[in-house]
């Protein structure tokens, strides 16, 4: 007959269990108080749930007449959210616009992030590709509010999916001012191959015909529909309003090693990085 396991509780395990339970009891009221304090300090934020999202792709080789770069400033009521677009005055010879990240994919990611925070988001109808005259954020809000007065907030989003080559191409004419699919970029760097080398952080030591970074630049501003007050805003690496003040290390992290990546891996890393950033940028709905 096998001996029964001992019923004596290890004192160390008992202490660890006690500390864990005490921590849980402390965290719950602290979270409740912080949420309550947040709502008390920001009464204008209460009741913001139904959000209409305006997406606008910002190609790296173009600029707006009143703004040269996506991250040059926050999206405001006076911002020309719709073109007409102009050729960019300052082009990075290593940067390529990624065609694979489009409104459909961005819409799915942004809506998913908002829903996880307690919002009820939906996309606005498709914006005209080339308007005859600039349309400001205020004009778009007024036009939409006339159609749907029940919306609680407007979220305007510029996004720029960009891939960076480790080195400028040998012949500048090989890269034109247009969007490239990831498959095209792979063939540009490694003709006949299915993938490319994603170089580590040391750009000076990166191998030829490799990529060094792939990133979705982002500019976001949420306006309350009642009075068009700015609730929170993001412009590239800048943040304002009630967004979290720090961004954790989102994938892909820095590495000393070069690794192989095909179009699927590149796109997956770009999207995972964006989802991670949005999770920490977008505040909870109350």
Image (tube, rainbow, N blue to C red):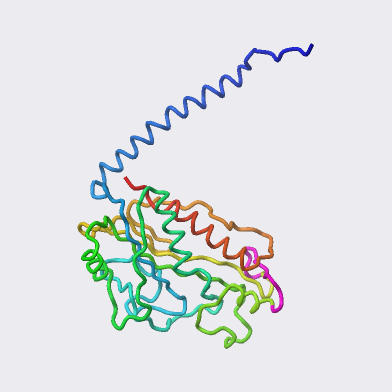
Q: Position of residue 239 (x, y in %)?
A: 38, 58
Task: Decide whether residue 16 is among the magenta residues.
Answer: no
Residue 7 lies in what quarter of the image? top right
Q: Position of residue 234 (x, y in %)?
A: 38, 60
Q: Position of residue 160 (x, y in %)?
A: 46, 70
Residue 262 lies in what quarter of the image? bottom right
Residue ID at (50%, 83%): 177
Magenta region, residue range: 191-205
- Decide: is 57 above or below 46: below
- Decide: is 34 above or below 7: below
Task: Decide whether residue 196 is among the magenta residues.
Answer: yes
Choose between 173 and 278: the one closer to the eye: 278
Choose between 244 and 112: the one closer to the eye: 112
- Decide: is 225 above or below 175: above
Choose between 181 and 42: the one closer to the eye: 181
Please name the predominant secondary structure of the magenta segment in the image.
loop
Residue ID at (37%, 48%): 118
């Amino acid at each position: 007959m096998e001996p029964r396991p001992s019923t004596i509780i290890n004192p160390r395990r008992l202490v660890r269990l006690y500390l864990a339970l005490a921590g849980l009891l402390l965290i719950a009221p602290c979270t409740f108080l912080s949420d309550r304090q947040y709502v008390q300090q920001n009464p204008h934020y209460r009741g913001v749930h139904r959000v209409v999202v305006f997406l606008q792709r910002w190609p790296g080789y173009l600029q707006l007449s009143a703004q040269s770069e996506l991250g040059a400033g926050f999206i405001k009521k006076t911002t020309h959210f719709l073109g007409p677009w102009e050729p960019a005055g300052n082009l990075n010879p290593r940067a390529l616009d990624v065609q694979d990240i489009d409104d459909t994919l961005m819409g799915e990611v942004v809506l998913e992030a908002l829903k996880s925070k307690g919002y009820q988001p939906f996309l606005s109808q498709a914006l005209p590709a080339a308007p005859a005259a600039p349309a400001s954020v205020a004009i778009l809000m007024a036009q939409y509010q006339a159609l749907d007065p029940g919306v609680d907030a407007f979220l305007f989003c510029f996004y720029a999916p960009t891939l960076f080559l480790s080195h400028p191409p040998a012949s500048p004419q090989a890269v034109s001012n247009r969007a490239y699919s990831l498959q095209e970029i792979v063939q540009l760097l490694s003709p006949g191959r299915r993938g490319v080398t994603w170089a580590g952080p040391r750009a000076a030591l990166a191998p030829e015909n490799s990529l060094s970074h792939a990133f979705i630049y982002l500019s976001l501003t949420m306006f309350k529909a009642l009075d068009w007050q700015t609730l929170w805003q993001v412009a590239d690496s800048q943040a304002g309003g009630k967004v979290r003040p720090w961004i954790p290390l989102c994938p892909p992290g820095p590495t000393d090693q070069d690794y192989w990546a095909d179009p699927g891996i590149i796109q997956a890393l770009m999207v995972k990085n964006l989802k991670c950033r949005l999770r920490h940028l977008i505040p909870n709905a109350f």
